[in-house]
Amino acid sequence: MSAILSADDLNDFISPGVACIKPVETLPQKESQSENPYEVTKEDKVQPENLPPAQISLTDCLACSGCVTSAEAVLISLQSHTEVLNTLESYPELPLSLGSDQRATQNVGTADSDSRIFVASVSPQVRASLAATYGITEREAKYMIDQFLIGPHGLRAGGKHRNGFTWVVDTNIMREAVLALTADEVTSSLSSNETGSLPKRPILSSACPGWICYAEKTHPFILPHLSRLKSPQALTGTFLKSALSKAFGVSPSQIWHLAIMPCFDKKLEASREELTDIAWASASAESQTTPVRDVDCVITTRELLTLASARGLSLPSLPLKALPASCSAPFPDQALDSFLFSKSSSGQTVESGTSGGYLHHVLKIFQARNPGSKIVTQRGRNADVVEYVLMSSGDEPLLKTARYYGFRNIQNLVRKLKPARVSRLPGAKPPAVSSSASRRQAMSRNATPAGPGTDYAYVEVMACPGGCTNGGGQIRIEDAREATPSTLKETLTEAPVAASKATPHEQRAWLARVDEAYYSADSDSEGSVATEPVSVLSRDTEIHEFLKYWSQKVDTPLSQLVYTSYREVESDVGKTQNAPNDTARVVELAGKIGGGW
C-alpha cells in the first residue's frame, strides 16, 4: 500500500471516525482459573470490556460496502510517488527535435524502444489545494507544478537520467469536451425512445470513479443509467496517447502519462481494462496483444508533496512564474496545441460547483436554446442535494435535473431508481435466466421504475460530500499547518496550530479556503484569459470542431475515443480466495492491462 495512505485517511466519503466505530464482535473470555469450579456466573455479572474500534482497511472501506476487491487494492498500491521515481530512473527520455516550425518532431524508426515521452495532466482541484496550502493564487500553483515537473530546478535537477516531463496538461481542457458531449447525450436521450447505445433516463454522471465502483459492485440495475462518456482524466489520457503516438510514430507504450488528481479512486479508474489503447488503436497495432493503459500512474495532491520531498525539493521554493519558452516545447500539431493550451475561461464558478460543472453546463445549454427561460433551484435535505428545474417563459418545466453528493445522499437516489419487483403468485415458477446479465436485462425491461427520481433528465453524482475539492487525496489542514503554519494562523485560529486533529469548524473553514482558491482561477489569471465572453453554444461548436479534427488526425472514429462501458463486478471482500494469493492475481491482471508493471 502507498505509504501515504492509512486508516486515518479513509475520509473520502463518510468519516470513519463517525460511521465506522462498531467494535469487532467478541464473546466474553473465560477466566483462566476459578475458585469454585461449580459456581455459575450470571450473565448480568459479566462485565464486557471496552473494545477497540474495528480496523478498517482500504480493501474494506475505500468505496463503501466492500466495493474494492483485494486485487484492486494492490493495483492502487502500485500507483504512488515511488512508481513515478522508479519510472523516471528506469527509462531515458525520448529526445524530441524541433522542426522548421519549432514544433517537436521525431523521425519514425529512430526512437529507442527503451526511451519514453513523459507527459502529465493536473486537475484544477489539485491546484486549488496547493494554492490554499501555500497562500498563493491558483495561477501561481500552476506555475509551481510546471516548474517542478518540467523546469530545470525541479525533477530534472536530479536522478539518473535527469528526466522530467515534456508537457503538463490541464484536465480542464478535456473537461470542456466532456461537458459538450454530455449536453449532446442528454439531448439525444430526451428526443429518443431510449434505444440503442444511449443510457436510460435519468442519465447519471460517470466522472467519479468512487461512484462507478459502488454502482458496479452493489447496484448493477443502475448501470444502464450511467453516462457512456469517459471522465476528463481518461479522455486526457486517450488524447495524449493517440495524438502523440500518431505524431511521433511510436508505440503508446513509449508515452508515459502521469495524472495528478484529488482522490485515490482515480487510481482505480486508471486500472480499468476498458481504458486502454485497445479501445481506440487500429487492428494492426501492437496494443491488440499487449494493451497499454491511457493513464499509466495516478498520484494525489499529498503524494505530489511526497514526490518532491523524496527528491529533496521544496515546492514553495520553486519560481512562481511561467517557464521560459526554451523549457517548453510546442505540441507537435498546431491546431491541437492551440486548443490544448488555450487561454479560455476555466468555467470554475460557484454556480457550476467544484466537481466539473456537468449539471450546470447542461442547464446553460438548454437555457441558451430556450430564450427567456430561467433556472429554479430547490435545496434538498442538505447542501449536497439540490434540484434544478429549467422553466420556460410561460412558467412551464422544460428540464428537471439534480445534484447528489456523498454516499448517504447517493443511497437515497439509488432507492428512488430501484426497479419495482415483478409480483408473482405464491408458488409460481420464477423466470429462467442464464446469467446475471440476462437477469438485469429482464429486470430493466419488465419492471416499472418507482419513485420521484425518475423524472430527472440528468443527475450529477459525486461520492465526496462537498465535491471534488474535498477528495481524500487533497492536502489536509493538519498537513497544511506543518507546511506553512503562518499562512493559516489568521484564518484558522480556533485551536492551537500544534493541534493534531482539526475541529469540524476548522475543517469546514479549510474546505471553504480550498473552494475559494478553486473559484478564483479566472480572477487571478493575470489577464491571460480572453476578456470577451463566449456563449456556451459558440464554445460547444468550437469543441466539436476540435473533436472532429482529433478524430481525423488519429484516423479513429470519435465514438471509440470518447465513450467507454461499465459492467457488473463481484467483489471478493470477505470471501474465501481460491487463487494462490492476491499478489499473483494482480500481477496477472497488471500484465493484461499493461502500464509498465
Image (cartoon, helix red, strand yellow):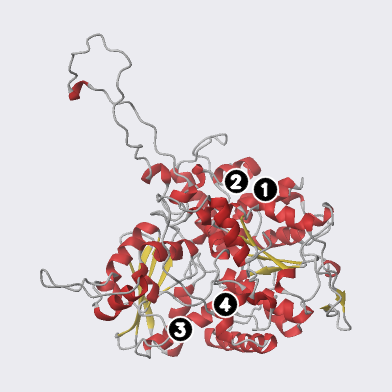
Looking at the image, tell me whether mark 2 or mark 3 is earlier in sequence order.
Answer: 2
Q: Is residue 58 visible?
A: yes
Q: Residue at x 29, y 74 (%)?
A: 433
Residue 241 locus on image (x, y percent): 68, 74
Q: Is residue 454 left or right of residue 531?
A: left
What's the CA distance linking mark 3 and mark 4? Answer: 14 Å
Point out the image quarter for the C terminus: bottom right
Cβ–Cβ under 8 Å for marks 1 and 3: no
Question: Residue 229: image x %, image y %?
Answer: 50, 77
Mark 3 neighbour density, 10 Å: few (under 14) some (14–19) many (20 or more) = some
Label 2: which residue? 4
Residue 366 against residue 512 in the figure, above or below:
below
Q: Which mark is residue 306?
A: 1
Q: Is residue 319 visible?
A: no
Is disc 4 placed on a helix, strand or loop?
helix
Between discs 3 and 4, the one toward the N terminus: 4
Looking at the image, which is closer to me, 286 or 110?
Answer: 286
Residue 44: percent from left, percent from top: 18, 24
* Residues packed near mark 2 inside 10 Å, few (<14), some (14 to 19) or many (20 plus): few
Cβ–Cβ below 8 Å for labels 2 and 3?
no
* Residue 157 vertical position relative to residue 219 in the rendered view, above or below: above
Identify the residue at horizontal 34%, vertical 88% (top origin).
393
Mark 1, secondary structure of its residue: helix
Q: Earlier in the sequence, mark 1 or mark 4?
A: 4
Q: Position of residue 306 (x, y in %)?
A: 67, 48
Label 1 sits on what residue type?
Thr
- Residue 33: name its quadrant: top left
Q: Amino acid at mark 2?
A: Ile
Q: Which residue is mark 3?
A: 185
What residue is pinned by disc 4? 176
Q: Which residue type carries mark 4?
A: Glu
